[in-house]
Image (cartoon, rainbow, N blue to C red):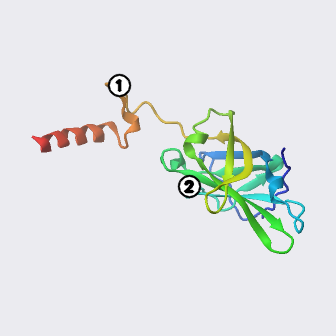
Amino acid sequence: MSHTMKPITQHNPHTATPPPSTPLLHITVTSLQGINHYTSFLNPTIKPFITLSSTHLLSTSPLLHHNFTLRIALDPSFFSDTRASLHLQLFTKRRILGLAHLGSCLIPAHDIGLLPHGSVRYLSYRLRGKDGAKGHVVINLSVRLENAPWISTDTCHTVIGIPVTAIRGTCTDYCTTIMSDRRKVR
């Protein structure tokens, strides 16, 4: 059972467009399942909307486009940080008491991955409550990445089956560290 969303957004006309080399993430909410568990006598209709937060967002308020698509400018270091993620929160606006938190989830950077230009990845998450317990709502998303930061393979090569680019730093830094560590042991 899916539910259509009527998002509440604030458009900021002073938001500057990101530079052309900035990675842009397009997140489209394709459906919400199980959201009818949150209806009540006082609140018979659900008016859901989503907020996204991360330390790697370049814009403070993502721009909402048609078809419930959020366009988000990401910091290029988003995909190189192993703990980077987007925090998605689902709220509803109630008549009397204001906003109600319906659930949240973390979208890790490795779930999005470095997609080829024009490719779409489909993700589904079960939202969790404020206390961390599993909720009833499942959110289905489609993710598309523009201006992906491709990892250069020119700087380092595979040595004895170990990809050197996976280790932080340049090849010379890595080799110097290994050599200096061996000298300290002897």
- Residue 73 at x, y = what percent? 64, 52
In the image, 113 versus 12, the foreground residue is 113
Q: Is residue 148 visible?
A: no
Image quadrant for the N terminus? Answer: top right
Report which residue position mark 2 lands on: 56
Residue 161's tag is 1
Q: CA distance from mark 1 to mark 2?
A: 32 Å
How many other residues sit within 10 Å of disc 1, few (<14), some (14-19) or many (≥20)? few
Relative to 171, say whether 40 is above or below.
Answer: below
How many other residues sit within 10 Å of disc 2, few (<14), some (14-19) or many (≥20)? some
Residue 58's tag is none
The residue positioned 68% from the left and 40% from the top of the image is 123
In the image, 39 versus 162, the foreground residue is 39
Specify the quadrant of the image occupied by residue 92: bottom right
User: Left or right: where does residue 9 sit relative to residue 165?
Assistant: right
Q: Is residue 186 visible?
A: yes
Specify the quadrant of the image occupied by residue 50: bottom right
Relative to 131, say whether 72 is above or below.
Answer: above
Element at label 1: loop
In the image, 165 versus 41, the foreground residue is 41
Specify the quadrant of the image occupied by residue 114: top right
The residue positioned 31% from the left and 25% from the top of the image is 160
- Residue 156 at x, y = what percent? 37, 32
Q: Tag 2: residue type?
A: His
- Residue 8 at x, y = what percent? 81, 62
- Residue 179 at x, y = what percent? 19, 38
* Residue sitting farthest toward the bottom: 96
User: Left or right: where does residue 38 sit relative to residue 27?
Assistant: right
The residue positioned 83% from the left and 48% from the top of the image is 66
